Every structure is written in C-alpha cells, then in structure tokens.
Amino acid sequence: MTDTDGILSRRVRAELRKLPAVDKLLQEPEIQALVQESGHEVVVESARAVLDELRGRIRGGDPAPAREALIVAVRERLLAVTSPTLRTVINATGVIIHTNLGRAPLSAATLAAMREAGGAYNNLEYNLAVGERGSRYEHAETLLCRLTGAEAALLVNNNAGAVLLMLMALAQGREVIISRGQLVEIGGGFRVPDVMAQSGARLVEVGTTNRTYLRDYEQAIGGETVLLLRVHSSNFRLIGFTHEVSLGELVALGRERGLMVVDDLGSGSLVDTAQFGLAHEPMVQESVAAGADLVSFSGDKLLGGPQAGIIVGRADLVARLKRHPLARALRVDKTTIAGVQANLLHYVRGEATREIPIWRMIAMSQREIESRASAWAAQLARMGLPAVVSEGRSTVGGGALPGETLPTCVVALAAPSPDALAKRLRQATPPVVARIEGDRLLLDPRTVLPGQDDDLLCRVHEAWQARGEGEDE
Ligand SMILES: *Cc1c(COP(=O)(O)O)cnc(C)c1O
C-alpha cells in the first residue's frame, strides 16, 4: 500500500506542478483580454477559484488540464459570476400571463417610456408650472380616472400592497366583513386572511364556502364594522350549488349602514374578455359604476403593463391612503410610473388589443396560430424531428378566468422521455419552457413572441439531438 501511495503522490505532485501560478496564468493573452473586458479583480478571483478546484481534482487522481482547457474554465467561471441571473426565456407553454415567467411582456411604447424615464431627469416630484415640489402620485391619476370613471387613483408597488394599504389605512383595529367563499390564496404567499391579520383589521367571516347571502352580511354588522370587502376568487371557481352577493347589493347595504365597500378585483380588466370567446372577467369600470368606494387591481395581469398595484375610487379615501406611512413604503419608481402611463395610453387610444402583447396573444386568430405551428412543424420535420401539428388549449393565467381556455394549435413532439427533453430545453440559451402532455412535448405558438421562432426551433433541434444522454433521469 505504502508503495502505491508513494507512486501516486509522486504522480500527483508532478501533475500539480503543471498548473501555473495565478500570476503566470494572468499573463496569458486570452486572460489579459478578459481583464480588459471585466476588470482585474473578478478575473483574478475566477482564476484562483478554477486553480483551487483543479488542485482538488488532481489530488483525486485527475491529470492536469491542457493550457486551452484551463483558459476555457476561467472564462466560463468569469461568465457565471458576471452574468445576470434574470434571463430572457421563451414561453412556449401557452399560458399568457405566467407569473413564474414574469407575467406580462410589455409593449414597445411602454418599454420606450420606461427607458426614457430611467435614463434622464424628469418632473417626478416637481411641478413645472410653479417651480415647486410636486407629487409623484399625480402622474397616472388623470388617465386612470378617465379610463375607469373613478374620482381619484393611486399607484403602489403591487396589488398585494394595495390591499394591505387599504385595510391598514381604513380598517386597522376595526372589523371587516368578507364572505367565506372569498377567503382565497392567490399564490406567491398572498392569502386574504393573512393579509387581513397583517393590516390589523379584524376579519369577520360570513356565509359558507359555497353560499353567502346578503342577510349573512347584515347580521354580522356591529359597532366595530367599518368595511365590507369583496375579493375576486381569481384562480379558482366555485361551481354547482353556489351563491355570492353582487357588488351592487353590497354597495346598497354599505350606503344604508354607513360602511365602506372595497373591491379587490385581482386581475381587473379594462377590456371585455367576452369578445374573445372567454367568460366575462370583471371590469374595473363596472366596479366603479356599481359604486364601490375603492377598487384595486394589478398592473401586470390583464392590464398587460409593468408590475404595479392600482387603486381607484372616492377622492377622500384615496387622499387618506396617500397620507398613510405605508404608502411611502409601497411607492412606485419613475420607470414604473412612465410604463403604467404608456400602457394606459394604449387603452385611451383604443389600440390595447393591437399594441399590448398579452391582448395580442388573447386576440390572436386561430388561422394565424395554425400557420405558425405548421411552419414550425415543417421546419422541424426537415431537421428530422417527428413534429406534428395538433389541436390544443391556451390559458390566460394570472389568476384571471380559471378553467377558461382558448383553442390553439400546438406543435407536438412524441419523445421517449418528454421530461428529459423539457429539461434540456430549460437549460438551453435562451431557455425554452414547454408543456408536457402524456408522452408528448407541446409548443404553443400563442405565447412565443414575434422574432423568437428561429431561436426556439434551433433550441428544440439541439435538445432533440442531445437525447439519449441522461434520458432516464
Ligand atoms: C393577483 C391578486 C392579488 C395580488 O396582486 P399582485 O399584483 O400580484 O400583488 C391580490 N388579490 C387578488 C384577488 C389577486 O388575484
């Protein structure tokens, strides 16, 4: 044993000596080029890390790498350190508002507005007419009022924040009545009862999971009650023997008993989804017209804009919200304000379904999708892949219209291990996220952005070629 150990360690020592010192490695022209690009510090750090790792491997019996392999390893290490973790992904799932994939891709005009706001000074909180301090809250307010018919509006970081702010500012230490059928969990940790508890408002549940009547609310109103809350059930649907009180009825009850009525619409749409063969998603204008005191909704669900929480409603209540310290903690930045405004302008101009990507996807004609799917299948077939066009269903997502789907055409690839294929696609550059149904991998053209087609097909081809490796994992 000692003999072999002696021979091994002599061999190991010889291999270790083949590794250059860090200073020596840094003098290589390829490494010098990396220093020019990324700076001395990160390159030295990467070189050290690579050399350390190699020393460990050599002690474990590996030979020292060739010079070229060493340089490639440093370059890859550097790239891992200096590349952003948030990357562009091709969404071939057919889920239009995919929260895990960043919800709504933005329109060209929205992006341009955000870029401009981010790259220069602006009148974010400066009143140009009088040369004094102004308010950042004023910017999107006029547009929101015009589009929804509300008296006033407020933009915050997201809709979860909007709900928290409304409850905290208007109902802290008091009672809020909500139907048991609306105590929902939206995903990403937003549970209505938990948000309520955080706000300091006391939750009074009425009715049953499936049926709640106006008399349930009436009987629960007491001296501490200040607010009736309605929450859109968003990502789930009650079917069968069900009853919920309409917003109009709640508003009438609220007026009679002097209580505020707040409507958390979740997605909230400014466009009627029924025109696309979908169920009717509650519209913001309808809630305002029905007399809700405040209505809240997301900026990046069916509105199709940047992440934001939007509150519209009574001017005196919005003023109270603006004064609350939490509003400061939830405030939006200049790029968000610019993006929300640009996105809202698409609705003002009546061009939302043409210009806003999520609406373009929802409105996409069956013929357009089919011709794209056929072109993909033909190209993949030329590359030797058994791709076929098949009927499928796309979904809206974003907690809007649960159970509702849009007919689509998908490209289907029967694979021995569709999971392994999907995994290789996720690891491609750019990553492709697809859907699996049975033993087939499905690619839905509806959510693949214009201009991503070639990239998608090349990645699919490569992933298909690489099959066999790790197929059974
Ligand atoms: C999505 C949703 C929220 C949370 O909105 P974010 O903008 O994601 O913070 C709150 N309430 C309802 C009903 C929702 O559907």
Image: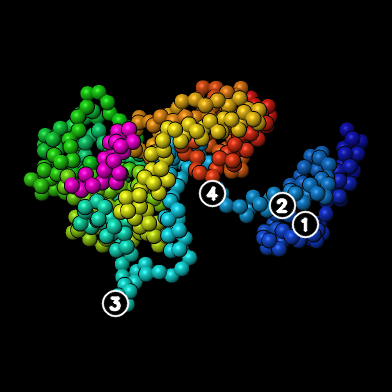
CB of residue at label 3: within 8 Å of ligand 1?
A: no
Res 432 quadrant in image = top right
Q: Residue 455: image x %, image y %? A: 59, 41
Q: Earlier in the sequence, mark 3 or mark 1?
A: 1
Q: Amino acid at mark 4?
A: Leu
Q: Nearer the viewer, residue 114 or 2?
A: 114
Q: Residue 446: image x %, image y %? A: 46, 37
Determine crowd level at label 2: few under 14, some 14-19, many 20+ residues with C-alpha closer than 10 A.
some
Q: Amino acid at mark 3?
A: Val
Element type at marker 1?
A: helix
Mark 3 touches mark 4? (CB < 8 Å)? no
Mark 4 lies on residue: 86
Q: Earlier in the sequence, mark 3 or mark 4?
A: 4
Count the labels in the image. 4
Drawn side of residue 353 relative to residue 252, left or right = right
Q: Which corner quadrant holds the N terminus?
A: top right
Q: Earlier in the sequence, mark 4 or mark 2?
A: 2
Residue under the point 65% across and 31% down: 383
Mark 3 lies on residue: 130
Q: Earlier in the sequence, mark 4 or mark 1?
A: 1
- Magenta region: 269-289
Q: Amino acid at mark 1?
A: Glu
Element type at marker 3?
A: loop
Element type at marker 2?
A: helix
Determine crowd level at label 3: few under 14, some 14-19, many 20+ residues with C-alpha closer than 10 A.
few
**In whole angstroms, how far apart are the C-alphas of marks 4 and 2?**
20 Å
Element type at marker 4?
A: loop
